[in-house]
Amino acid sequence: MRICIIYGHHNTKSSFNAAIRDTFIEEATLCGHEIDLVNLFDEEVQLPFYNSDINPPPQIVLDYRKRLENSDVMFLIGSCHNLRMPTILAVSYTHLRAHETL
């Protein structure tokens, strides 16, 4: 199974969320799964804010969508702020799931 992990936590090295990410990747790999990690804070180009009703999606969004379409499962990892996911994860999720309407 191909698993797309969307990691959206600012501490990419030594946080609790990083430990969850690393442990999950290690165990999933041992079980024979293929991992595609999108580390939102370490990406060279950040996801832009755009309105798809006005503008077409930027190429980076289309690239992320393709990665998701090539996966069987999407797994979101990030901190929890007042029972909500952080903005970087919420925005990326909104961009990624928009492929259903294309």
Image (cartoon, grey):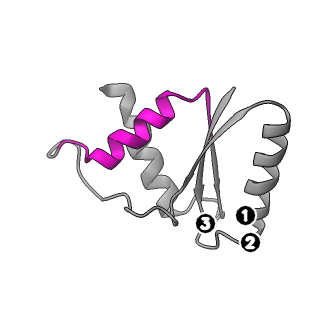
Residue 10's disc number: none
* Residue 79 counted in the magenta span: no
On screen, residue 54 versus residue 67, left or right, reads left
Q: Between marks 3 and 1, how big is the CA–CA gap?
A: 8 Å
In the image, the segment drawn in magenta is 56-74
| Residue located 37% across and 31% down the image | 99
Q: To which residue does mark 1 refer?
A: 18
User: How many neighbours does mark 1 have within 10 angstroms: few (below 14), some (14-19), or many (20 or more)?
Assistant: some
On screen, residue 2 versus residue 55, left or right, reads right
Q: Quadrant of the C terminus?
A: top left
Q: Position of residue 67 (x, y in %)?
A: 48, 36
Q: Between marks 2 and 3, how big is the CA–CA gap?
A: 9 Å
Q: Secondary structure at mark 1?
A: helix
Q: Position of residue 74 (x, y in %)?
A: 60, 37
3 or 1: tag closer to the N-terminus: 3
Q: Position of residue 4 (x, y in %)?
A: 60, 39
Of 29 and 64, nearer the camera is 29
- Amino acid identity at mark 2: Ser
On screen, residue 78 versus residue 87, left or right, reads right
Quadrant of res 65: top left
Q: Secondary structure at mark 2?
A: loop
The answer to the question of whether label 3 and label 1 lie on touching residues, with beta carbons closer than 8 A, is yes
Q: Is residue 67 above or below residue 22?
A: above
Residue 15's disc number: 2
Q: Is residue 6 above or below residue 72?
A: below
- Amino acid identity at mark 3: His
| Residue located 79% across and 39% down the image | 28
Q: Is residue 95 above or below residue 72?
A: below
The answer to the question of whether label 1 and label 2 lie on touching residues, with beta carbons closer than 8 A, is yes
Residue 9's disc number: 3
User: How many neighbours does mark 2 have within 10 angstroms: few (below 14), some (14-19), or many (20 or more)?
Assistant: few
Of 47 and 42, nearer the camera is 42
